[in-house]
Image (spheres, rainbow, N blue to C red):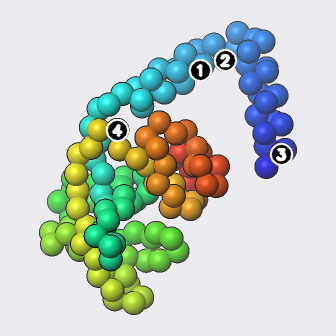
């Protein structure tokens, strides 16, 4: 991890000392500001045994929402190393190995927390990286 931080520090230094990345820096800042707005976003979540709603990872939310928008009745995802089939018509997820089943839901939320794709930790809405494993928000596995 140290080598990556060292390299990224060199890239930032280079970008700050040249006009080469000026346009890129501006686009990145615009995207960050847009991400921090309180605009509602779709959140798919599952209910655990203690009746707490747990959001799926950003990547799985994208996959589930694409299936929902395409009017598909089911979609398969992987989460925490486990394979699930989601029944989008009956709002149920089924573990394909254990056949256990849970309720799922789709909501529109403002200021919603996000779930790390790597470790499944629920992070604050404004966090750019996971508090637990330091993965960058939206980073694919």
Q: Which mark is residue 76?
A: none
Q: CA distance from mark 1 to mark 4?
A: 26 Å
Name the residue that disc number 2 marks.
21
Q: Check if mark 2's residue and mark 1's residue have beta carbons within 8 Å.
A: yes
Q: Which mark is residue 24?
A: 1
Name the residue located 58 percent from the left edge and 44 percent from the top edge: 129
Q: Position of residue 16 (x, y in %)?
A: 74, 15
Circle 1 sits in a helix, a strand or a loop, which is it?
helix
Name the residue that disc number 4 marks.
111
Count of numbered circles on the image: 4
Residue 106 figure quarter? bottom left
Circle 2 sits in a helix, a strand or a loop, which is it?
loop
Q: Is residue 86 visible?
A: no
Nearer to us: label 1 or label 4:
4
Circle 4 sits in a helix, a strand or a loop, which is it?
loop
Going from N to C along the chain, the mark reached first, 1 or 4, is 1
Which of the two residues, 14 or 111, is positioned nearer the viewer here?
111
Q: CA distance from mark 4 to mark 2?
A: 30 Å
Q: Residue at the far left: name it.
A: 89
Which image quarter is the C terminus in?
A: bottom right
Going from N to C along the chain, the mark reached first, 3 or 2, is 3
Residue 5 figure quarter? top right
Q: Residue at the far bottom: name it.
A: 98
Going from N to C along the chain, the mark reached first, 4 or 2, is 2
Q: Position of residue 140 (x, y in %)?
A: 55, 54
Q: How many residues crowd around disc 4 within 10 Å: few (fewer than 14), some, or many (20 or more)?
A: some
Q: How many residues crowd around disc 1 within 10 Å: few (fewer than 14), some, or many (20 or more)?
A: few
Q: Which mark is residue 2?
A: 3
């Amino acid at each position: 991890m140290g080598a990556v931080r060292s390299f990224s520090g060199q890239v930032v230094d280079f970008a700050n000392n040249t006009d080469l990345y000026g346009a890129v820096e501006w686009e990145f800042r615009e995207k960050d500001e847009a991400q921090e707005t309180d605009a509602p976003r779709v959140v798919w979540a599952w209910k655990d045994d203690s009746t707490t709603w747990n959001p799926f990872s950003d990547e799985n939310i994208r996959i589930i929402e694409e299936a929902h928008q395409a009017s598909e009745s089911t979609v398969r995802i992987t989460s925490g190393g486990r394979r699930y089939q989601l029944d989008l018509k009956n709002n149920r997820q089924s573990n394909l190995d254990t056949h256990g089943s849970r309720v799922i839901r789709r909501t529109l939320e403002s200021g919603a927390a996000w779930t790390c794709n790597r470790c499944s930790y629920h992070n604050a809405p404004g966090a750019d990286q996971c508090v637990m494993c330091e993965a960058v928000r939206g980073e694919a596995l």
